[in-house]
Amino acid sequence: MMLNIQSFNKKLIARNSQNLVQNLEFHLKEVMENGISILRNSLKERFPEEKEKILRAGFFFHDAGKSEISIQTALYEDKRPPISHTHLSVIFFYSWLIDFLKEDLYKLLQDEKLRVISFCILSHHSAPHRELENNIFSQILNRKITIAKETFEIFTKFDFILSEDTLIDTYKKFIEGYKENIYEFKFESILNLNSRKFFSFFYNALVKSDWYSAMEIEIPLVKPAFESIEPGKFLLPDKSKFHKYIYGKKEFKENILLELPTGFGKTFLGLGYALKTKRSKIFYTLPVTTIIEDVYENSLKKHINENQLEWYTSKYLVLKSLKKGNVEETEYLEARYFEKPVIITTLDQLLFAFLGVDRYPLKEAPLYDSCIILDEPQLYSPLMLFLFSEFLKDYKDNLNIIIMTATLPDFLKEKVDEFFVEPFNQLTIENSFAGFRRVNIDTTYLGYEISTLNFEKKLKDLLSKGKKIAFIFNTVGKAQKFYKSLPKKFPKYLFHARYIYKDRVNKLMEMKNKLNEEPKRPIVVVSTQAIEAGVNISFDVMFRELAPFDSIIQSAGRVNRFNENYHQCPVYIFGDENDYLPYKREQLKITKEILINLKISSELDLLISLREYWEKIKTFLVSSREKASKLYKAAKEISPFSINLVEEKIDLRDTYFKISVIPYKFYNKIKELYEKYNSYGRKEFWEKKKILAEIESYMLEVPFWGIKDFMWAEEKFQFINFINLKYDEDDNLGLVMEGENSLFL
C-alpha cells in the first residue's frame, strides 16, 4: 500500500486522557531533551556533534508515527488507535537518517547502533522481543496510511529536515522488505557486551523520559548514595577488626567476601563498603520479602532518607497497598525500575535483568555502575548462585560486589574466587567465630519424631523460668499440627508463610514485638524456615527439626543472638532423614552424620563442620551447575530481542513447584473486586492494576503436589485459582489441610 500525505487541519496531539490533552510537538521536544540528558548521565560522556544529533533524533522521532491521521482521529475521539504508531516512527527515523547522512537505506540498516535505536523506538511501549516486530509491522502491510502534513513543520522547527518524497520511498522499501522477508529488515542481531549496554541505556532513557512526559512530571534529580550518606553515622570502627577495616578505607575498587558469624552486624558493614565504592546505585539483596521489609524499616531507614531508599519485590504493590493504602503509579514505577540510589531487593530481580526478562533494560541499566550487596546467599537455590556467578564474568567491570554470610557455600566461593578479595586471612576469620560461644547443638532427640516426644513438662519448666522458646519445622503442616497440640493456656505464637498476604503483612512485626516485650515474657514460637535468616530476633531455647546443616546454623543464629544469656543456650535437633521434604534425603543423611560427631566449644566448630558439609554434598550440585551454564549460554547466544517472558511467571528458586491460590472463604470478596475491575475502562490502567493488587492480597503460595485435587477455577476469573481448603483465622492457623497430606504443606 502507498503512503499518503495530507493536511489534518488540527493541532497534532500525543495523548488525550482524563481531560488532559498533550501537544505532540511539546511531547517530542520534552522526551528528546530529557532522554539525551539521562543517556549522557548513564554513559558519563559528552557526544560528538553528529552522534548527538542522531541520538536526539532517536528520542525525538519515537512518537512521530502518531501523526498518522487515523491515529490522530482516534486520539481526539478518546478511542483506541486502529494501529500502533511505533513502526511508523521507525520509518520516520530511517527516512531522516537517509536525508541527514546521505546514505542508502540498506547500508543504514546494517549499522548496529542505528538498529538498536530503532528497536528501542519500536518497543518503547512494551517488553523488547522479536515477535513484537512482526506483530507491529503486520498492521500496516495491507492498509491505507495517511500522514498529517503538519508533522513536517514540527520536524523543521527542531532542525530535523525530512522530505516528503524520502518518507514515501522509505515506507515503500520497508513494506516490500517485510513482505519479501528480506534479511536486512529483521532484528536478529546478537549483541556484544558493549552493544547490549548501549541498548539498555538508550531504552531506559527513552522509556523513562516518555513516562515522565506523559504523566507531566519532572524527572527527579537523583544523587548517588555516596554523595549524601555518611558511613560514619552508622559504622562503628571499634566494634571489630572488620568494622575498622571498612571504616578506614577511603575507597574500594576490589570486590570483597566476608565470612562472619550470625548477628555480627553485616548489614552496615555491607552498606559502608558499598558507599565507599562510589558507585551510582547500591543494591542490597536479601532472599525473602519479609526480611527485606524488616531491613528496610528497622535498619536502613534509620540512617537513609526515604527519598534515597526503596525496596522492591514482585509483591511490592500488594504489600505497599496494604500498609500505605493508596500507592501512586510513579512510586510503583520508580521502585520496580530501581530509580532510588539505594534499593533493597532479591537476587531474582537482578537475574531477570541479566536473562533478558520482561522490560529488562529498565532494570539492567541501573546495574551498570552499581554495587551489589549479596547477603545470606546460601538461602538461594544453587541454580541461582551458579547463574549469578556465570553472569558476573560479563558484568564484573561495571559493578562492585560484596558477599556476606555466616554459611558461605564452598561451591559459590570456588566459582567467584578469581573476582574477589578476602581481606582477612583464614586465622582472623576463624578467630571471629571462635570468639562466640552462644549455642550448643544437642542431639538428645535426634532420630525421634516430634509426635513420640512429650515436651509438655519440659516446656512448662522452661516457661516458668521466663524462657523464649522456638520450635522450627520443615513444613507448615507440621508446624500447625504441633501448635494445635500445645495447651491453650501456653503463651504461644504461630508464624509461617501460608497466610494470605493481607494477614501476613504485619505478622513478623507482631512476633518481634512479643519477643521484645519489657519486662521479658515467656513465649513459645512455632515456625518454619521463614525465620531462619535475616530476622533480628533472639530465643533462649530452640527445638529444630533435622534440616540441611547450613539451615541448622542459620536457625541457631536466632538463639542467644546478642549473647544476652552469658552462657551457651541449647538447640535441640529432632527428627530423621526419612521425613526429608522439602529437602533431599541425602542432605539430611549427611547432616545427621555430622551432628552425631559434633562437639562444640565455640562457633568455630560449626564453621569447620559446615565446610565438611559443603564438601560432601558437591556431587548433588552437578545438575544445578549444568542447568545454570545452559541458561547462561542460551541468554548469550540468542538476540536480546528474541524472547518475551513475564517476570511474575518465572521461578528461579529451583524448589518444588508452587502456585498462588485464594482460599474459597474469600470467593465473594474476589467476585466483588473483579466486578469493580471490569467496570474500569481501558485507559484506567493504574486503577485496574491496583484492583489486581488487592485481589492478590488474598493469595498465598502453596506447593502444587498434595493440593491439586483441592484447586478449581472459574472462567470469569482470569488467572485466579481457588482452593477448597479451610482458612483458619480464629486460631491463627492460616491455610489448613487436614489428614496425612497436611504435613506436606
Image (cartoon, grey):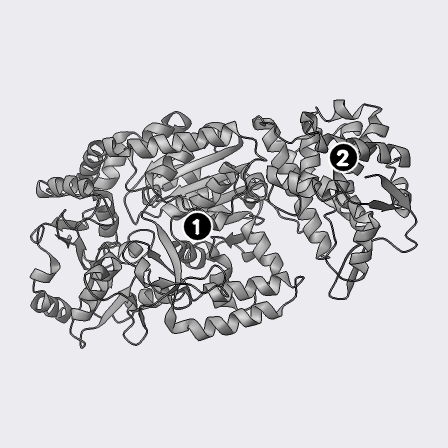
Residue 175, which numbered label?
Answer: 2
Label 1 Cα crowd, 10 Å radius (few <14 / some 14-19 / many 20+): some
Q: Nearer the viewer, residue 235 or 95?
A: 95
Cα distance in 3D space between marks 2 and 1: 62 Å
User: Disc 2 or disc 1, which is closer to the eye?
Assistant: 2
Viewport quadrant of the N terminus: top right
| Percent x, y of residue 140 | 75, 43
Q: In the image, is residue 691 above or below residue 619?
A: below
Judge left or right: residue 49 versus residue 289: right
Q: In this orientation, which residue lies closer to the viewer: 359 or 669?
A: 669
Snapshot quadrant of residue 106: top right
| Res 683 seen here | yes
Q: Amino acid at mark 1?
A: Phe
Question: Which residue does the image show at 12% across and 59% down from the upper left?
Answer: 450
670 w.r.t. 77: above or below: below
Q: Secondary structure at mark 1?
A: loop
The location of residue 665, given as percent across then percent down, is: 37, 73
Please tell me which residue is depicted at 58% across the width and 27% down the height of the picture: 190
Q: Is residue 251 visible?
A: no
Secondary structure under badge 2?
Answer: helix
| Dot 2 or dot 1, earlier in sequence | 2
The C terminus: image quadrant = bottom left
Amino acid on which the number 2 mark rests in the picture:
Ile
Q: Which residue is mark 1?
A: 234
Above or below, comparing residue 70 to residue 354 in the picture: below
Disc 2 + disc 1, Cβ < 8 Å:
no
Q: Residue 115: x and y, percent?
A: 69, 31
Residue sitting at x 26%, y 48%: 554
The answer to which of 341 and 17 lies nearer the viewer is 17
577 over 662 or under it: above or below: above
